[in-house]
Image: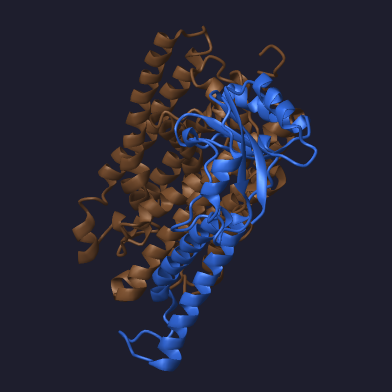
Amino acid sequence: MALKRYVVGCFDDEEVLFPAVKKVRNAGYKIQDVYTPFPVHGLDHALGMRETSLHTAGFIYGITGTTTALAGMGYVFTQDWPMNIGGKPNFPLPALIPITFELTVLFAAVGMVMTFCYLCQLAPFVRKHHFHPRATDDLFVMAIECTERTNVEDLKGFLQSAGAIEVDYQVAESGWWFGRYDIQPKLYAEENPVIG
Amino acid sequence: MASIREQFEVSGKMKTWSMGLMGVGILAFIIGFITKGLSSDEHQQAIFWATLLYNSIFFLLICNASMFFICVTTLAHGGWQVTFRRVPEAISAVVPIFGLIAIFILFFIVFGLNHGDHNLIYHWRIPGNDQVILNKTGFLNPPFFVIWTLLSIGLWSYLGMRMRKLSQESDEATMNPEQGSKWILKNTVVASLFTVWFGLTVGSTTPWLWLMSIDTHWYSTMYSWYTFASSFVSGMALIALFIIYLKNRGYLEYTNDEHLHDIGKFMFAFSIFWTYLWFSQYMLIWYSNQPEETTYFQPRTNNGVWKGVYYLNLVINFICPLLILMTKNSKRNYTVMAFMAVLIIFGHWMDFNQMVMASVSRDHVTLSWLDFGIAALFVGMMIFFVGKALAKVPLIAKNHPFLKESIIHHT
């Protein structure tokens, strides 16, 4: 439940955003994330983010689905309740493939969605901190995490010189999401002077 | 633009390789013709001609798949393929040549292999009083076969040539946006004609006519789609191979990992699609278990001698692409892509081999030096003619309206 301080810069143009990301990273600041209204190609690369392992998780879920389907149907049709259906063998592999396929897809899809929500700390009734509401509309919002040594005013000026049209300072909680935003209103009232 | 190498030159090594392969192929052809083609054993003759048949059709269809790829991307107003568009164009330039060879072989089988009361490969040619075949003669008869074959190959060649011409015309002068959109419209018209004709031929009738009719009693509506998927995925693999070759020789500066990644996706996706059709065709017949339908699978599964080839096929064409091409990194790795492209082409070549030969020779597997020799002949010809076509025009369509989109393409 650590409180973290952020300097937030808003950009209204992709062509300004990319050089700005580069400048900020070169200056040694730590970018928490850039929130965009739509997927921006190459931004993850520019931010130097490591590649997501969501697809590895998806592969594992898929295999789990395949195994579950084959093991489940295999058990039912050979051990639990063997039946003669149209003279086919008790473990009729071709007939089981469609269901195996479906379960593979189901496990992979549902598993990946849930993992994605877990990684992004999304869940019903959890209120996420929005650095800027217009990040869902027409602004690219860059949140930079401040350390003890960060000079907030310097950083603000730096962002403005890099082309940010709006800069402010915010305190938000980071970390795990259970009960994380209980004290949020108080925080906003005391520590979030909005500039710009 | 000035610094890039626009003009491809056929290297000595490429020439040597293509000549060498053709030499091996011609040698195999001659020895095969003497030992099998002129043999008094009808079965050996059938094997010889069927080998020529499936090889010529396989290589014709995978080259034709290149033009299909260009046409569908044109129709979809896709821009990402423009930097390497001249490569599939060059590959499709081989269609008229391979088409002529295929026409010769097909017509020879239909008209030259009639031995008394039966044809060695196409049993529908002389139906006798076989009621099942007589019912099919509306579709399976020599005049229709001849007309449809000529029309298919003729229109593929003609419309492909139109597309290539349009592409080459764009090199002459830069286009303003208005001329550009007009030019794109012209492309779209020809591409849609080609796509429709492709659907009527490769997508439905032609594989029934050329390949499925070998098992005259049997039928599967899935068969053409299966053939199409096979030829399209190997066609994409072929494009990938040529691109990797050109990249290694220092050409195609604007084509990079991103484009290769997308081609890899095509190879991956259509391998899965092929498997889907493979399975659909198999499962329905397995499930209903009708004698007239299961004849096709008797030599190929269970106790059939072709079992090994048939299932190896599934491993090469499904499990290998599924596991190896699944990750992003492998689709961006030139070595992995080249390996997979060769594997996929080989796998689908073997698939065609099994589709034709298991029907002609149900009791023993015929995969031998003759198959590899004839394949070498076609591969050699393909390298030779594609190299020639590549060298004829600049490697980059520099005035294509979507070129910029393709250069900055990002997957």
Q: On screen, B385 above or below A129? A: above
In percent of width and height, residue B395 lies at 61, 22
Q: Relative to B392, is B181 on the left or the right?
A: left
Residue B47 in sight here: no
**Chain seen in brown:** B
In percent of width and height, residue A171 lies at 62, 43
In percent of width and height, residue A59 lies at 57, 62
Residue occupying image coordinates x 57% and y 16%: B398
Q: Relative to B290, is A28 on the left or the right?
A: right
Residue occupying image coordinates x 55% and y 26%: B406
Image quarter in which the C terminus of chain A is found: top right
Q: On screen, B375 above or below B287? A: above
Image quarter in which the N terminus of chain A is found: bottom right
Q: Quadrant of residue B103?
A: top left
Q: Relative to A139, is A80 on the left or the right?
A: left
Residue B281 or B272: which is nearer the viewer? B272
Q: On screen, B283 above or below B115? A: below
In percent of width and height, residue A130 lies at 52, 42
> What residue occupies the far right of the structure in this picture?
A149
Residue B147 in sight here: yes
**Chain A shade:** blue
